[in-house]
Amino acid sequence: MTPDSTPTAKRALVTGATAGIGAAFARRLAADGWHLVLVARDAARLAEMAAELTGRHGREAETISADLSTDDGCALVEARLAAGSPVDLLVNNAGISLNKPFLRSSVEDEARLLRLNVHAVMRLTLAALRPMTERRDGAVINVSSVAGFGAVMPGSTYSASKAWVTNFSESVGQSAQPFGVRVMALCPGYTRTEFHDRAGINMSKTPEWMWLRADDVVDEALRDLRKGKLVSVPTWKYKVAVAGLRHAPRRLLQAVARDTRGRIGRDQA
Ligand SMILES: NC(=O)c1ccc[n+]([C@@H]2O[C@H](COP(=O)([O-])OP(=O)(O)OC[C@H]3O[C@@H](n4cnc5c(N)ncnc54)[C@H](OP(=O)(O)O)[C@@H]3O)[C@@H](O)[C@H]2O)c1
């Protein structure tokens, strides 16, 4: 399984494929010759994206309208992964943040975040890996975040959910390798998408240099997947940030976190 620029008849299923990083994956993979299965909730936007990909690249683009924070939504996508034309690449990309600190949050909102960012990723990864390991071919990219490398945003369950995605992907990636299947966590920093607007997070004070383009994130992710990496952190500036988060003394990170506490709920990546 090689996502490269050679036209292939391979098929990728992308969740959250109508906006941001998921749409960038869908467009890039279609341009590279992949057939697509597009998943999101908004059926009209899905149909628009499918028409764009088919019109521009002549690729097949199935759509599944599903809310992945629900059991029924996950079951729909699991059923597609289990039957029909084989899916060679799963991109678990759909994810949300909340614009409120945990102490002011509700069980319903936190559960919705965990169901989409964690539970759906677990279910769809398992559903995809079964046929992939049998075929001894395939790959899964789980879109995580640099936010998962440290509790630098106190009061946020988003970081914790992404720490789970990264740890889970690295762990499962190692057990899938002997079967010829790759699993990789993709950990972007701030990326220009609809993500922060949807959560109502004000990003106006975030400096321009911190922002990534979704297309660049996808380029680097596909390169890292080809190299067999288990964890991909696009761009050197976020690699440096992650090295700091991984190796700086805990007390220093906690001091930085205290300093940013006032901004929580506004600046989560
Ligand atoms: N943007 C950043 O700065 C950033 C940084 C690090 C990591 N990430 C991660 O990157 C991933 C993609 O984020 P993005 O920035 O591209 O977000 P985005 O622009 O807001 O796009 C989100 C996509 O997910 C779909 N979606 C949302 N809720 C869903 C649900 N319950 N069920 C199914 N689909 C759902 C949306 O379509 P519908 O609304 O139609 O469902 C849309 O297609 C997320 O996992 C996020 O945590 C983002």
Image (spheres, rainbow, N blue to C red):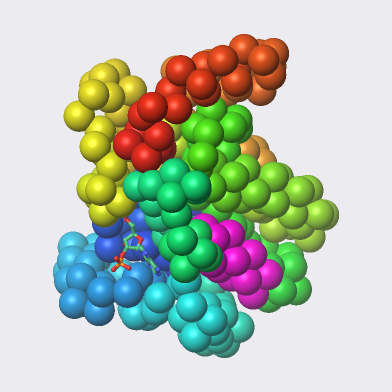
Residue 83 placement: quadrant: bottom right
Was residue 115 drawn as part of the magenta stretch in this picture? yes
Residue at point 40%, 55% (across, down): 96
* Rendering quadrant holding ligand 1: bottom left
Residue drawn at point x = 28 percent, y = 42 percent: 201
- Residue 101: give x, y in percent of width and height: 44, 44
Q: Is 24 rendered above or below residue 262?
A: below
Give the side of residue 22 with respect to residue 105, left or right.
left
Foreground residue among 261 and 79: 261
Q: Nearer the viewer, residue 12 or 100?
A: 100
Q: Is residue 150 above or below residue 140?
A: above
Q: Is residue 164 left or right of residue 7?
A: right
User: Residue 39 falls in which quadrant of the image?
Assistant: bottom left
Whether 75 is among the magenta residues is no
Front residue of 121 and 180: 121
Identified at 59% across, 66% down, the residue is 119
Image quarter (top left, top right, bottom left or bottom right) of the N terminus? bottom right
Magenta-tinted stretch: 112-127
Where does residue 245 sit, x and y in percent of width and height?
A: 60, 22
